């Protein structure tokens, strides 16, 4: 349950400075994200997540009526490449089980490949997964489970994650 307060713009801005990105403890090869967060003084914490690789919370802040850590129903699953995406989709049962669990969340699949969709169509990846079948599987899963896939350069992943969570939480707190 979200707090039922109306925050002023000043209070909202101050409260959002405590926003903490949660990083799944099993997440691998993400030093570029941690480095970005460190460089921008963005709070983050390693925590075992049930769904996805990244999520967000606001820590307890009694001054603003938050009596305990406040977790938000949002998650991002990160894939480092089209090959990792293809491998995940090939493991249909495991992947689909995660998507079923994610339906209660605002879920996004992020692939670190700026030209990812084009690379799928043109078969510019190592996996033996046929491009047409890979697109069909991905788009079927998106439609069935109501999530979006975003293809971005690895260099902007940290920025994307922070802003994705920041504006989601801000919107909830501002318009609740």
Image (spheres, helix red, strand yellow):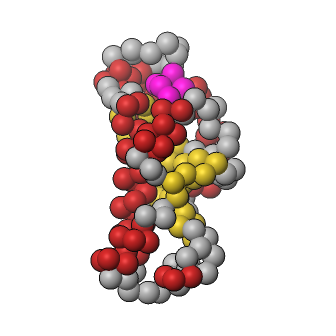
Give how far across and how far down residue 129 sits, in percent: 51, 19
Question: 45 or 173: nearer the eye?
Answer: 45
Give how far across and how far down residue 111 sits, in percent: 44, 34
Residue 65 in view (yes/no): yes
**Against 42, is 111 above or below?**
above
Q: Residue at x 37, y 44 (%)?
A: 159
- What is the tally of numbered marks visible in this picture? 0
Classify residue 91 by image quadrant: top right
For the C terminus, the quadrant is: bottom left
Question: 171 or 99: nearer the eye?
Answer: 171
| Side of 30 where 117 appears, left or right | left
Give how far across and how far down residue 99 sits, in percent: 57, 49
**Against 161, is 113 above or below?**
above
**Against 68, is 20 above or below?**
above
Residue 133 in view (yes/no): no
| Side of 149 where 24 appears, left or right | right
Q: Residue at x 46, y 52 (%)?
A: 42
For the N terminus, the quadrant is: bottom right
- Confirm whether the magenta stretch covers residue 51: no
The overriding secondary structure of the stretch rendered in magenta is helix
Q: Residue at x 38, y 86 (%)?
A: 6
Q: Residue at x 47, y 25 (%)?
A: 81
**Against 62, is 132 above or below?**
above
User: Which contiguous range is marked in magenta?
Assistant: 80-86
Give how far across and how far down residue 38 sits, in percent: 48, 43
């Amino acid at each position: 349950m979200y707090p039922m307060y109306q925050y002023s713009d000043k209070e909202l801005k101050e409260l959002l400075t405590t926003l903490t990105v949660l990083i799944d403890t099993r997440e691998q090869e993400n030093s570029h994200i941690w480095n970005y967060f460190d460089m921008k003084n963005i709070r983050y914490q390693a925590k075992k997540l049930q769904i996805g690789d990244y999520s967000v919370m606001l820590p307890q802040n009694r001054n603003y009526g938050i009596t305990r850590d406040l977790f938000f129903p949002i998650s991002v699953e990160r894939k480092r490449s089209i090959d990792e995406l293809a491998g995940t989709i090939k493991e249909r049962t495991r992947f689909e089980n995660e998507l079923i669990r994610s339906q209660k969340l605002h879920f996004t699949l992020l692939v670190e490949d700026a030209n990812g969709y084009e690379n799928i169509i043109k078969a510019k990846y190592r996996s033996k997964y046929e491009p047409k079948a890979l697109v069909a599987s991905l788009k079927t899963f998106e439609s069935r489970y109501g999530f979006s896939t975003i293809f971005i350069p690895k260099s902007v992943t940290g920025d994307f994650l922070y802003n994705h969570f920041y504006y989601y939480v801000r919107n909830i707190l501002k318009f609740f």
